[in-house]
Image (cartoon, rainbow, N blue to C red):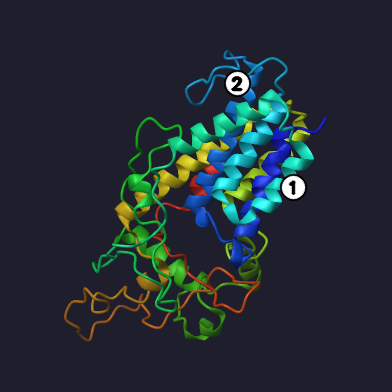
């Protein structure tokens, strides 16, 4: 028998990939909205499965429990209906794909199907007031050290500046406050010098001053390997972490019930990771290297002090980064359009694992 959780998890991950590859099907894009979507789908799948199995000791409901379905209800039919409904709502441009998968793996005639529909609607209703990732109304700070758009990509805007602050959590019971990042001290200066040399655009390598270690060829390959945001067919970090969890679940021989719980936990955690990380990103609002290195000297930038002849050697007003690769398009390599601290990749990964 096909494991319904693994089946629909794969469908959800394919939807994530398509939405980040085909411009005509862009929905739930970026780290925040894609992690939210995966959380909604997998929590609906979990509650649909748990409601039919009716084992509250081992599989307690996530949302308020619904009346159990009638006799003969199939948990697989319930999971299929819940997954299809949530995916079709979140990724409406891919509905034909989801319909085909429902025909392959669903059973609309089974009582579990109707139960799955109710569960999905309950989860969707619970998240209906979530904010989107729009930057409408956002005004970036002009203070030194604050995040602004990449000067080499001035139309990039800002990703989800209100999302973290205005979203309710999936599982968290309180917010986590981070200490401010190091800034304008010895630790910060050491990091700035390292990033200046190791992160510089290849065509600018010859501009590095003495005492700054340049990036090696091997380090360039390593950087490109991990800077996977721009590659078509890859999706977002939450998709990649789900792929790792799939391999672990299959290797361990998980039961369907174990997978229902596992993927709900992983994706609820990453949903909350996106909320908390973006909340803290825009609280601390730390600039990225493309601005921080260019404006390191206090006589540069919109909050500049009066210029003098003692310009810092640690800044470079023409510096550009290697950047995250747009390896499947003709667009420039890019700096992400949200503040640097804390790391989204690290937050998602730590939550998942």
Secondary structure of the residue carrying numbered label 1: helix
Q: Is residue 118 left or right of residue 283?
A: right
- In percent of width and height, residue 351 lies at 52, 39
- In percent of width and height, residue 301 lies at 27, 77
User: Is residue 257 in view?
Assistant: no
- Considering the image in quadrants, where does the N terminus appear? top right
- Asked whether the residues under the numbered discs 2 and 1 touch, taking CB atoms below 8 Å apart as contact, a structural biologist would say no
Based on the displayed image, in which of its 4 quarters is residue 85 positioned? top right
Name which residue lies at 62% across and 19% down: 69
Residue 51: mark in rendering: 2
Residue nearest the viewer, comparing 169 with 314: 169
User: Is residue 277 in view?
Assistant: yes
Secondary structure of the residue carrying numbered label 2: helix
Q: Is residue 329 above or below residue 68?
A: below
Based on the displayed image, in which of its 4 quarters is residue 80 positioned? top right
**Residue identifier under label 1:** 100
Q: Is residue 163 above or below residue 127?
A: below
Residue nearest the viewer, comparing 117 with 218: 117
């Amino acid at each position: 028998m096909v494991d319904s959780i693994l089946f629909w998890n794969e469908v959800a991950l394919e939807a994530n990939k398509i939405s980040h590859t085909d411009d005509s099907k862009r929905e739930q894009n970026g780290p925040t909205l894609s992690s939210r979507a995966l959380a909604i789908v997998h929590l609906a799948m979990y509650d649909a499965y748990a409601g039919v199995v009716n084992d509250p000791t081992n599989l307690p409901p996530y949302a308020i429990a619904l009346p159990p379905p009638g006799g003969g209800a199939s948990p697989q039919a319930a999971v299929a209906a819940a997954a299809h409904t949530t995916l079709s709502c979140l990724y409406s441009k891919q509905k034909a794909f989801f319909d085909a998968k429902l025909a392959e793996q669903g059973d609309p005639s089974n009582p579990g199907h109707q139960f799955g529909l109710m569960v999905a609607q309950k989860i969707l209703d619970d998240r209906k007031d979530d904010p989107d990732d729009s930057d409408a109304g956002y005004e970036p700070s002009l203070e030194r050290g604050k995040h602004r758009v990449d000067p080499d990509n001035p139309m990039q805007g800002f990703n989800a500046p209100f999302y973290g602050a205005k979203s309710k959590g999936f599982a968290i019971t309180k917010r986590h406050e981070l200490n401010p990042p190091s800034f304008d001290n010895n630790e910060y200066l050491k990091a700035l010098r390292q990033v200046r040399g190791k992160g510089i655009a290849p065509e600018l390598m010859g501009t590095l001053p003495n005492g700054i270690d340049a990036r090696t060829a091997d380090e360039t390959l390593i950087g490109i390997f991990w800077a996977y945001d721009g590659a078509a067919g890859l999706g977002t970090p939450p998709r990649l972490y789900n792929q790792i969890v799939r391999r672990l679940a299959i290797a361990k021989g998980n039961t369907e019930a174990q997978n229902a719980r596992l993927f709900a936990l992983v994706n609820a955690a990453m949903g909350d990771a996106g909320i908390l990380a973006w909340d803290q990103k825009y609280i601390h609002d730390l600039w990225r290297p493309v601005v921080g290195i260019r404006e390191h000297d206090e006589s540069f930038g919109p909050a500049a002090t009066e210029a003098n002849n003692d310009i810092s050697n640690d800044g470079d007003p023409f510096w550009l980064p290697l950047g995250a690769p747009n390896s499947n398009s003709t667009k420039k390599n890019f700096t992400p359009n949200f503040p640097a601290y804390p790391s989204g990749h690290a937050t998602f990964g730590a939550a998942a694992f």
